[in-house]
Image (tube, rainbow, N blue to C red):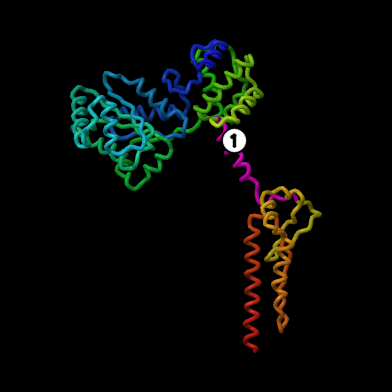
Amino acid sequence: MYQTSMYKEYYKLRDNPFQMTPDPRIFFASKGHKRALSYLQYGLSQGEGFIVVTGDIGTGKTTIVKNLIAGLDHQTYIAKQLVTTHLGEHDLMEMICESFELISRGLTKAALLNQFKAFLNSAHKLGRRVVLVVDEVQNLPTKTVEELRMLSNFQIDNKPLIQSFLVGQKEFITTLQDSSMEQLRQRVIASCHLGPLKEHETNLYVNYRLKAAGWAGGPLFDDAALKLVHKLTEGVPRRINVFCDRILLFGYLEEISFFTIEHIQTVADELAEEITSPLKLHEEKEATQILRQVPPNNINRTAKQPAAAGMNGQVLPMATSADASHPKVEELKKKNVSAANITGLTETKISQCKPVEKKVISVNPVLSSDFVDIEDTIKDFESRVEKEIESFKKSLDKKF
């Protein structure tokens, strides 16, 4: 916090522009956020059913909820937000009653339900609507989610006394698809999934947060720098906040007044060494994707290089020196397996049998760069040889 105060003074900022705590005063409405907020507001206008908002970690779901609650008329609505963990049905009812400032401890589940129903009836008589926002709903077991549906059965004149908003990570979609959730699904009047920011939205987001915190100067980042910020954070607002906070700290220490792509890369390199780096997962994912893009037969072969015949006469590329560092090559080296001794092994097995009649078994050298399937190729070849030998033995038995 002390370091943040230092760069705030250096850049003449009133507040921390990239604070982690959701603040409805600096709500950035991207296209996805506007859509999610519109669904929540639509749900309020309907006064019934469930609204479901899901999203990846750090995409701003809680910020949207806080923005919604902050904009409500508190003379009309009684709105509470409940952050859940792995709760049973009884524990959930205790938390709900406690959030609405009702007696919660020491009561049976039936007593909790009766008390909450009485509270809903009282609110209705006063002309007030009760809204329950359940955050991190993906943590709840299926039976506990079903308990939330049961609360929607509290009605007067066919009008629900409570309206619930279910907010959680994408895992909750799997819960909703469970066969036992059919009744709840039928009561969901709208749902949406919140994704990361697009590249141009990341640019707008960073500049918006800076201005909201009091930045009055010109552009602080060049376009290439913000493009790299988006790439390294994958457009996830929480990652952007962590990353940009460190960038500003770096800028204060190095007395930087305008950030270029080189500055961003320097901070990224420093963060990559930290266990809690918001960029580390991205780097690992990117590395995995690159490895998956390398095909097992990716051999640079010129027209002059010969080809070897495979098991079924197919043409297989000859291995080159470029393959020497391939991980599968090293694995086969450790096992002392090579194309040469594979061929020698199979030829030795065949030569041990001396047929009375000539029966030719052709053995072609197996030289394949596809080291992923070489063991299967060996097994297949040996199996075929054994079948030929067995067939030959049977022919001998018939003759003698």
As drawn, which residue projects farthest toward the right? 304
Q: Is residue 385 visible?
A: yes
**Vertical comparison of 282 with 251: above or below:** below
Read off the magenta span. Answer: 277-300
**Between 284 and 36, the one nearer to me in the picture:** 284
**Vertical comparison of 288 with 95: above or below:** below
Local packing at callout 1 (Cα closer than 10 Å; few below 14, some 14-19, many 20+) is some
Three-letter amino acid code at the position of disc 1: Glu
- Residue 278 is one of the magenta-drawn residues: yes
**Percent coordinates x, y for residue 51 in the rendering:** 35, 33
**Vertical comparison of 372 with 210: above or below:** below
Horizontal side, residue 183 vs residue 337: left or right: left
How many marks overall? 1
**Percent coordinates x, y for residue 346 in the rendering:** 70, 68
**Between 178 and 10, the one nearer to me in the picture:** 10
Q: Is residue 309 visible?
A: no
As drawn, which residue projects farthest toward the bottom? 400
Give the residue displayed 33% in from the left and 42% down from the top: 142
The answer to which quarter of the image holds residue 229 is: top right
Give the residue displayed 26% in from the left and 21% down from the top: 76
**Between 288 and 254, the one nearer to me in the picture:** 254
Horizontal side, residue 67 vs residue 261: left or right: left
**Percent coordinates x, y for residue 39 in the rendering:** 38, 30
- Residue 382 is one of the magenta-drawn residues: no
The answer to which quarter of the image holds residue 54 is: top left
The answer to which quarter of the image holds residue 244 is: top right
- Which residue matches tag 1? 283
Q: Identify the secondary structure beneath mark 1.
A: helix
**Percent coordinates x, y for residue 30 in the rendering:** 48, 26
Image quarter in which the C terminus is found? bottom right
